[in-house]
Amino acid sequence: MENKDGFPEMPHVSILQHALKIYTNNLYKVFENRYIKGEGCCQDLLNSSETPYDTEHIYVVYENHFSKNFGFMVRFNLPDQNIVCDCKKYSFSSILCCHYLHIFNIHCVPKIPD
């Protein structure tokens, strides 16, 4: 099933549905490709800190399940959904990288944060 713009309907993936609403068709396609790439990533939790008002997780995200020789450090603050990745792709393209999207997926983040 496809939507009016010819993209596949994925009603069970809320973040993709949100991306369809806020991005142009071309940007959505880039986002969708990064989301799919993020699905193939794996992570190691390096540190987790919790206070009554804050929860921060630090991960290394690897793009390949079979080789953990190189990964990017991702810091994710759960309450405000603030996220920072060492790859810095977001700084250059303003579209979330696959590392962000992988971490959002494991934490069930339903939409792209403002």
Image (spheres, rainbow, N blue to C red):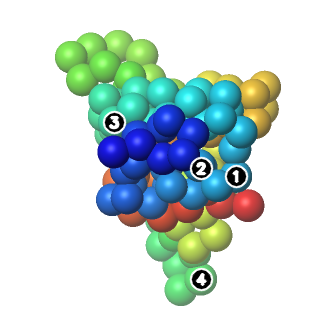
- Residue under the image location 31 percent in, 19 percent down: 64
Residue 65: percent from left, percent from top: 24, 23
The reply to whether the C-beta atoms of the residues labelled 4 and 1 are less than 8 Å apart is no
Residue located beneath label 3 in the image? 39
Q: Earlier in the sequence, mark 3 or mark 4?
A: 3
Residue type at the position of mark 2:
Ala
Q: Nearer the viewer, mark 4 or mark 1?
A: 1
Dot 1 or dot 3: first in sequence order is: 1
Distance from disc 2 to disc 1, alpha carbons, whole Å, reads: 5 Å
Mark 3 touches mark 4? (CB < 8 Å): no
Instruction: From the image, tell me which residue sits under label 1.
Output: 22
Choose the circle earlier in sequence order: 2 or 3: 2
Are circles 2 and 1 on residues that touch, CB within 8 Å?
yes
The residue sitting at the left extreme is 66
Q: Which residue is mark 2?
A: 19
Residue shown at 48% from the left, 64% from the top? 110
Helix, strand or loop at disc 4?
loop
- Name the residue rendered at 57%, 57% in the picture: 18
Q: Position of residue 17 (x, y in %)?
A: 51, 55
Amino acid at the residue labelled 3: Glu
Instruction: Report whether 63 appears left or right of 73.
Output: left
Task: Characterize the local packing of mark 1: few (<14), some (14-19) or many (20 or more) Cα atoms within 10 angstroms.
Answer: few
Residue under pointer 4: 53
Real-space CA distance between mark 4 and mark 1, rounded to the nearest whole angstrom: 30 Å
Of the pair 34 and 92, the residue shown nearer to us: 34
Work out how far the residue at label 2 is from the one at label 4, CA to CA, in angstroms: 29 Å
In this rendering, is residue 78 above or below 99?
A: below
**Label 1's element?**
helix
Residue that appears at 64% across and 44% down: 84
Q: Is residue 66 left or right of residue 29?
A: left
Alpha carbon distance from label 2 to label 3: 16 Å
**What is the three-letter code of the residue carrying label 1?**
Ile
